[in-house]
Image (spheres, helix red, strand yellow):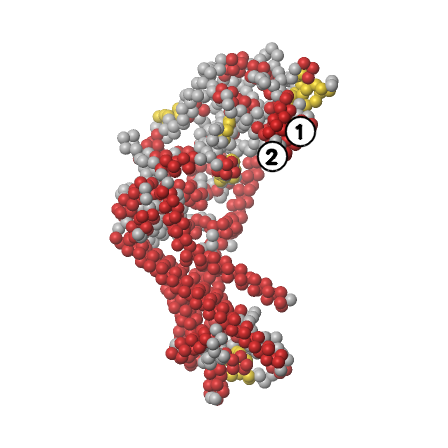
Amino acid sequence: MKLNILKAFMVGTLAALGWWLSLGISFGSDAVSDTGNCLLCHRYPSIGRYDEKGIKRVFYVNDKKFAASVHGKLACKNCHVGLDQIPHTDVKKVDCATKCHITEPSTNQEFSHANMVNKYEASVHGKGSAENPKPFAEDLPTCKYCHENRMYNPLQGMWGSSEALSNETLARCIGCHTKENWARDFYAHFTHRMRRRRTQAEVVKLCTSCHENREKMARHGVESIDTYKDTFHWNLVRYGVHNAPDCISCHVPLGHSTHDIRPREDPVSPLYVFNRIKTCSNQGGIQVCHPAATAEFAGGRVHAYGTKAQMLTGNKLKDYQGIETDRILKRAETDLSGKDIFHYKVLKFIKLIYKILIGGTILFMGFHQWLDFLAVKRKQKQLKGLANGK
Amino acid sequence: MGNKALVLDGEGVPETESVRGKLFFVRLNYAERVQHMIFAVCFMVLVITGFMLKIPDSVVTYFGPFGEAVFSYRSLLHRTAGTIMIFVCFYHVYYLLLKAAGRRWLIDMLPRPKDLWDMRDNFLYYINLKKEPPEFDRFCYKHKIEYGALIAGTTIVSVTGLILWTEYNWSKFVVDIATLVHGMEAILACLAIMIWHFYEIHFRPHKFPLDKTWLTGVIDEEEMKEEYALHYKKIMNDPELQKIYTKREP
Amino acid sequence: MKKLISKLYILGCMALTVLFMIMIWKVTFGDIVEEYHARKMNLEISKISDEQKKVEAEKITFKKAILEGDERIKHYLGYRVLEQIRLEGHFHHIDFDFKADKSNYCIECHGDLPHNKVKELRAFGNMHASFIACQTCHVVLEGEARTGAFKWYDRETGKFVKSPVKEGVAPGTYSSKIMSLERVNGQLQRIDTPERIEFSREYQRNEKTLSEIQKSKAQSIIHNIVSKKPYLCERCHQKEDPLLPLAELGYPQHRIDTILSTEVIGMIKDYTKFYIPMMLEFDEKSKAPQD
């Protein structure tokens, strides 16, 4: 019951906020610093075209939305470098590692996302270095695959529950930092990090958009994780439980960064065998998971055994051909220990027994009852015949 | 009060004063009926809440924003019903060992060679190679199969369920096996109930729509003579047994 | 009554049994079926060479490109849901649902962003298409037909409406477009007359059953008002004799200055190597009205 009331209250607050917002109150500063007057053309939503492949290319920028986003203070040229001609044949593709001419207040240096980009390129999702590029680099996600221009949400408390908290806090900030616009921006900027952008189900959707594709994953020597959907963890996520573990809860727990995901064998990785107990117990984070986890409990696999185990135990190797599968086969041989293979075989065996039992049960019982039904009907007819005959 | 016998298709038994003085045979006494009722309700709850984990994603979206509440209640109900069922099982063991009626039940329920012959003969009767079905004692092979499935199923499911409930104490391998077995055994139990038991009590043409023995505990004389002829003979020849197994309407 | 209940009971039980059986099948035997299919697919895929696979993936089928192309995505921003069309690789939020122009019959065949061939002009052409009707530029009126009169019409209804500029609607969000008027028999009428609209729609309805010759005939008739050379940029963006009567169309003076100003003209005349001059920065006075 309590949960329902809390939910109703949250929904009510959000609805009220939504109504208030619909009156046209914006957050963040009101004007975009459009020093290049790009909006002269780019404010029209129809600026764009359909290219040869039928893809709609739109060059429209919603300036209100942009101003309310985390990039709202930037001028167009800061990211879209090289705009000197119309039509813009000379513009370079946006590079997130560009220095965007904003001074970062803590170091007083020009800000850029370069440190994240460099970390990312060295992680499992990165393209590797120039001398040692990864094969099939076109599969790897670029910045835009996961990130869209994140918008500041209006003043809300933690987890979107208390608007009053934000109003009071902001009022105190404004007491000294009297420029209200600046104070709002600053408050919005660092509180927007207090909130998850994506729900658990959305995170799973985003990650599985690549990681469920068996072929793509095999090319990189990784298993497809459709086995996550068999776990209890996924059940929590799909029912929308607040505390549910999605991909990030285990693969990027507290203290790690999404841009720095390392392979399981790297001692830094949260899935390194000796780090797992810390990952499962997740102390100190918002999620409360398995605080009483033991090393034994945490040492196992969460997603069930998948392609690699199948390849090593079955005689289905002949079905997996081509260079894509060579990579995963090689990885399989190092990834799965003898113990893992044994576990997999035991589980498969148990399942086989049950399949036989269930199939046999259905057949036997169904057959028996069907015959019984016929026999009863027959007897009834007989008796009716006798009764009529009398 | 009695059950409709095979004789007249269920519609011919008049429920007027000719019920008076009728002889009824006890199949389930009070304690057994209570145990059965609690167990059956728990079973329903467990099956529904358990299979909620296996329904497809598109159905789960219908819960909308209430999904979280639904899930927490589901978990609570499942564990509560499971606990109650385990207690009923313990009581049943106590009943079987320490109560006279329970001991009688246990002895009668033990499988015998006769059951095999009965099964063969019954099959032959079904396929019309025998004119009459075999004579069954108090519990025929059908009941014994079902009881056996019940024991095995409940034990396995309860044990694995408890393992899952206390998952921290076990290695992941054990937890994996427990998960698999819990689910698969639950499926087996469901099948046993749906195909075997529900047919017996709901869909047999002369029992349709509901066999009331689980509430009343008795069946009438005609049915006794047809279904459990051997037991009927035993009872009618022994006044002691009559005291236990018969009831006469005043 | 009892019979009805028992019938419902049977149906209910049957439904439940069927559902359970399906679930049980999926859980117990489902993986066998899936594996079988996956293996078959693997076999098939591995038989095709890498080259062929690439070609296959890039083939543009109608289904893939058109029917499955209109995905919408939802961004849950916490305080609201931002729902917009999915544009691959588009970083900025759009949050603008283009109200389709239902009354302009050119669009029914040519689509909403028709300009595609001429690289220098196509984006600009499409940009103006959101607030200027096709006929305004592509129908060059001569002689008596020429009126110099233009009006705003609403996208959805097609009826003439008040000027959105006058009403203070932000540029880019107008829901109406500028349409030209011609003079026929001394009367001013809009170019997209009901007869022309009906003719075009009749053609579309019967297109499948027409022969080649009939199709050519119909298309000639529909396009007979379209001029070979449309009005180009200078025709409107000039100080001496601009095509559109901007003041009558509701534009305030500072916007008229912007549209007819030397910067815009200079930009057009000096096209392919145009370096954005600092002059293009607006000062406070000439800023376009924004909400």
Q: Quadrant of residue C207?
A: top right
Residue where numbered disc 2 is placed: C208
Q: Residue furthest top?
A: C240
Q: Residues within 10 Å of mark 2 (few under 14, many from 20)?
A: few
Please tell me whether residue B81 is drawn above or below residue C103 in the rendered image: below
Can you give x and y, in whole percent of width and height, for residue A173 in the image?
Answer: 46, 33
Q: Residue at 44%, 55% (x, y): give it.
A: C26
Whether residue A158 is visible = yes
- Mark toward the start of the polypeptide (1 vs 2): 1
Alpha carbon distance from label 1 to label 2: 15 Å
Q: Please tell me whether mark 1 sits on a helix, a strand or a loop.
A: helix
Do the residues under discs 1 and 2 have CB atoms within 8 angstroms? no
User: In which quadrant of the rendered view does residue A294 lie?
Assistant: bottom left
> Residue C204: image x %, image y %?
62, 32
Taking the image as shown, residue A102 lies to the left or right of residue A11, namely left
Q: Which residue is mark 1?
A: C199
Say which element carries label 2. helix
Identity of the amino acid at label 1?
Phe
Are tags 1 and 2 found on a single chain? yes
- In front here: A167 or C193? C193
Work out whether A251 lies above or below A189.
below
Residue in the picture at 59% in, 66% down: C6
Residue at x-position 31% and y-position 48% = A318
**Relative to residue C15, is residue C225 drawn left or right?**
right
Q: In which quadrant will I find the N terminus of chain C?
A: bottom right
